[in-house]
Amino acid sequence: MKNKLLLPLIGLGSLALLSACQTLTPPRGIKPISPFDIQKYQGRWFEVARLENRFEKGLTHVTATYRLQDDGTVAVINRGFNPKKGQWSESIGKARFTGSADRAALKVSFFGPFYASYNVIALDDNYQTALVCGPDRSYLWLLSRQRHLTPALRQTMLAKAKQAGFATEQLIWTDQE
């Protein structure tokens, strides 16, 4: 009887330890945008490009929508089309600031107590184009309020990503047509 109770407790303890060990900081040498205004950032963004990841593999027409909640958290709705399955997929999550709300360093969760780092590392003054990274240089997204960027803006954002040490030659350009 004791072992039956002990096993779930060990499992929960391991889960809590793994969750606590996750890094929620940006990659070394990268600073999130500050000052940052979540009011201006909220709304729908189109994914222009990304470093491929298992959560979005093969998706097209990807968007991310952010909405500030009354409790200070940010509702996150990621949506994309899977052309192989012929269907839309959607993930709903919640983000929280990891420090001050005027610094674009957040943690986001789509799976209960598990959070991942979400850092806005480049952003134009009008909140129309952004570079977002995770906890290391294997996660990068180029987001825009428009489906496409002008060639000049695209080059500017690529240069910023490359300067920050991201493998821009590995970016997947998201089909938004």
Image (cartoon, grey):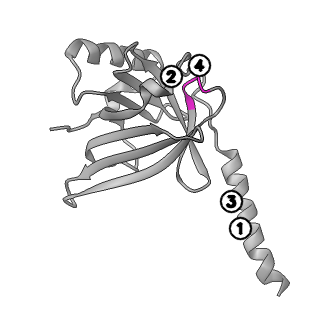
Mark 3 closeness class: few <14, some 14–19, many ≥20 residues within 10 Å: some
Residue reaching furthest bottom?
1
| Residue 43 visible, this angle | yes
Task: Identify the mark nearer the N-term, 1 or 2.
Answer: 1
The quarter of the rendered structure image containing the N terminus is bottom right
Task: Identify the mark nearer the N-term, 2 or 4.
Answer: 4
In the image, is residue 102 part of the stretch drawn in magenta? Answer: yes
Q: Amino acid at mark 1?
A: Gly
Q: Amino acid at mark 3?
A: Leu
- State the separation of the CA atoms marked 3 and 4: 30 Å
Question: In the shown orientation, is residue 165 left or right of residue 17?
Answer: left
Please identify the quarter of the rendering in which residue 177 is found: top left
- State the separation of the CA atoms marked 2 and 4: 22 Å
Residue reaching furthest left?
177
Question: In the shown orientation, is residue 9 left or right of residue 66?
Answer: right
Predominant SS of the magenta segment: loop
Residue of label 1: 11
* Vertical relation: 146 (above or below) 159: below
Question: In the shown orientation, is residue 84 left or right of residue 167?
Answer: left
- State the separation of the CA atoms marked 1 and 4: 35 Å
Residue of label 4: 29
In magenta, the rendered stretch is: 101-105
- Label number found at residue 15: 3
Q: Amino acid at mark 4?
A: Gly
